[in-house]
Amino acid sequence: MTVEQIGSEGKDQFPIGMRVLAVDDDPTCLLLLGTLLRRCQYHVTTTSQAKTALKMLRENKNKFDLVISDVHMPDMDGFKLLEHVGLEMDLPVIMLSANGDTKLVMKGITHGACDYLLKPVRIEELQNIWQHVVRRKKKDRCNSGSKEKPHPDSGEAAGIGNVDNNGKLNKKRKDQNEDEDYERDENGHDNEDPSAQKKPRVVWSVELHRKFVAAVNQLGIDKAVPKKILELMNVEKLTRENVASHLQKFRLYLKRISCVANQQANMAAALGTADSAYLRMGSLNGLGNFHTLAGSDQLHNAAFRSFPPSGVLGRLNTPAGLGIRGLPSPGTIQLGHVQNSGNPTNDLSKLQSFVPGNHNTNILQGMPMSLELDRLQHNKSVGHIGELPTTDSTTVFPGSGNLVDARITGFSNNPLLGVTSNSLMLEGSSQQATSHTSVSAIGFQNGNALSDFTSIAPASNQLQDSKAGSQGQASPINCNAGQIIRSAPQEWNAPRKDAPYQSHASINSSIPINSAMIQLGQCLDRNNSIFHKTTDLDSVGPLNFVDPLSIKHGEGDNSIMEPSVIEKEGYLMFQPRPHGSHVPDNIGSLEDLASAMMKQEGGCNGYSLRTSI
Amino acid sequence: MDFVNQLQRKFIDYSSSLHREGIVDDQFTQLRKLEDENSPHFVMEVASLFFEDCEKLINNMAIALEQKQGVDFKQIDECIHQLKGSSSSIGAMRVKNACIAFRSFSDGQNREGCLRCLQQLSHEYSLLKNKLQTLFRLEKQIVAAGGSIPRVH
């Protein structure tokens, strides 16, 4: 790793002196990249290890303006690094690869990369990368609150244009050589900026974000208003505006991941089962740098969809994974799924109940599930999973039936989730058009399974009350609000007949984590009678839901996940306990965050999800 | 200075032939352009790094292909990918093309095909290495004789 000082880079000379961190495991390419960057007069730090890069970034968040990273690296996937950086440091990241496959590029973009360059890199391309820094700053300025007014900043370089209300750029320039570490809330630097209106920039560190997410979860994504969040977070010097802008980004992020997840699932569905499908789900992880959401306009409009479980289900099909042996008896399994707020009614109608009971044997094995899902997939434009072939109670939703409904979305590096990429999404469909539940999607990563699990907060908290008779409005699941999906592991232990509403996450303990199968059955059912039956998966083991956090704790409890569930206004959060054995220990700090967050959520053990019915 | 001129001419000719034969491509020229007073040996440095890298990767692939228990095509794929990246970064066109061809065989999990490709790759690499080393020798001679490296466009 080399560090170079470029002498006397004035603050005003941006982009000259822009501080770039270059990461590539290939020494030839790294040398070339570093040289090219220096030729562009940037201040370059190079490293061949992603972990070292992260370490450097974490040590001092203000040390770099931009990160360029290779995609294929042995110690850490470039996309993962991308997510980490985006989430923790909110820096623009450029991906670099010899492989220019559209899919990869798409993956990079969805993970939040602000650009994707192909090797061999040309100097002309590098000469313009500073635009990403400016763009990001501008975006952040716009997002962080209304009070700022654009104001020409005398100290700023021409390229920066509008004033930086946050004073970040100023700060940076001033502090570049001082190497000061600003506290996130600190009103650090002050006022030498004649343009006034300087707001100290709030850096959303992992802990801060964790608190934020906890607060949001506690309030329920629908009810999470900045003021209340602020109160709950109880952090000094954090303003309502900071929270508001962060909340906005967060919502966009959730939306984005769900959309992408949806697309991914679709793709996966199209491909049928198999790991490849799974892998695609992987892209759901860490969907991204949620910080970048703010800028993605398209997300605003994107319909938030339920994620077709196909990808996941495909996985489920694998015999190894499937271990679902029993099916709940007659009662239909209600699967709730998260519906896109965009298509509430549609979704609702699609919910179907299926009764695993009769089809035990068929359900679990093989393709059918995915096929079924495919079918479901195509049913509606929204592609929500819920669509099982009619309400016929004998309809079996292959494999997935028992499992799940929960749509599990994992996003890696989501501070909420702390799960790595490649999360698996499971989605179940809920039956009964009327009810819909917020589905927790759990993302699992193929190989790493649990360690990569990201928890998902149930979207829009809506566990519909079955009794409420609210017509399964998909709406409750507010995509708009962003779905916070928590993985809800459910315990399938014993059928709970009395439970009017149960969400079940049943993951057969035999399901290897690797297959990342998590089946969450969330049953939203208006009809109580139907509901409880679903849990009747006798042989179904507990959902092996791995909470990355839990992973650390090495819970040895195989059989049951005991998620702690917090239900707020139909918004569920589950904290499953991991199935100890399988969890690969890949947890990084974000997972810690996620787990911490989860822990905060509540301590309901022996989770059985009852909807606030 | 006639001697230096001669050397320089030789250098230019040789350089052009490398381009003509496709041993190196435009990227190599770009690398040349990055050389200046501050980094006069940049191309040589990058090339030596590349040689090391390439040899290591070729070795790894050879070993992987010899595994009786089963060839790990994923590993081979990764090696190819990396080699492709570095060869394209240095402008080693034929090596890069050999990698591309190689990839289709490794995708197809075709061991025989891979072995053939590996051989081809090895061959291209050796060729590249020899030629570049000749070129660098010429460079050194020029510099030693007091001349400067002509820029070839």
Image (cartoon, coloured by chain):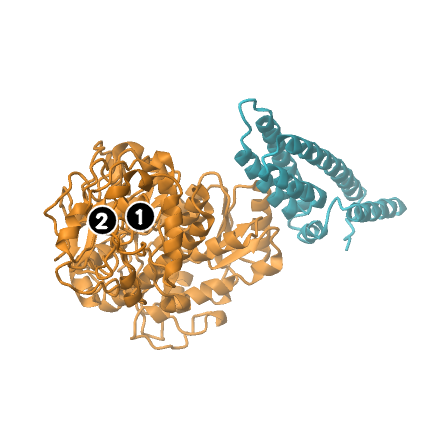
Chain colours: A orange, B cyan
Front one among A511 and A593? A511
| Chain identifier of the residue bearing label 1 in the image | A
Residue A443 appears at what percent x and percent y?
Answer: 33, 47
- Kind of residue at disc 2: Ile
Which residue is denoted by mark 2 in the rendering?
A333
Residue A570: percent from left, percent from top: 17, 58
Under circle 1, the secondary element is: loop
Residue A385 in the image: x percent, y percent?
33, 55
Q: Secondary structure at mark 2?
A: loop
Q: In this rendered view, identify the residue nearer to me: A442 or A348.
A: A348
Looking at the rendered structure, the kind of residue marked 1 is: Phe
Residue closest to the eye, A463 or A194:
A463
Residue to which mark 1 is pinned = A397
Does the image show residue B39? yes
**Cβ–Cβ below 8 Å for labels 1 and 2?**
yes
Instruction: Name the spot of residue B98 as percent of width and height, x first.
Output: 68, 41
Subunit of mark 2? A
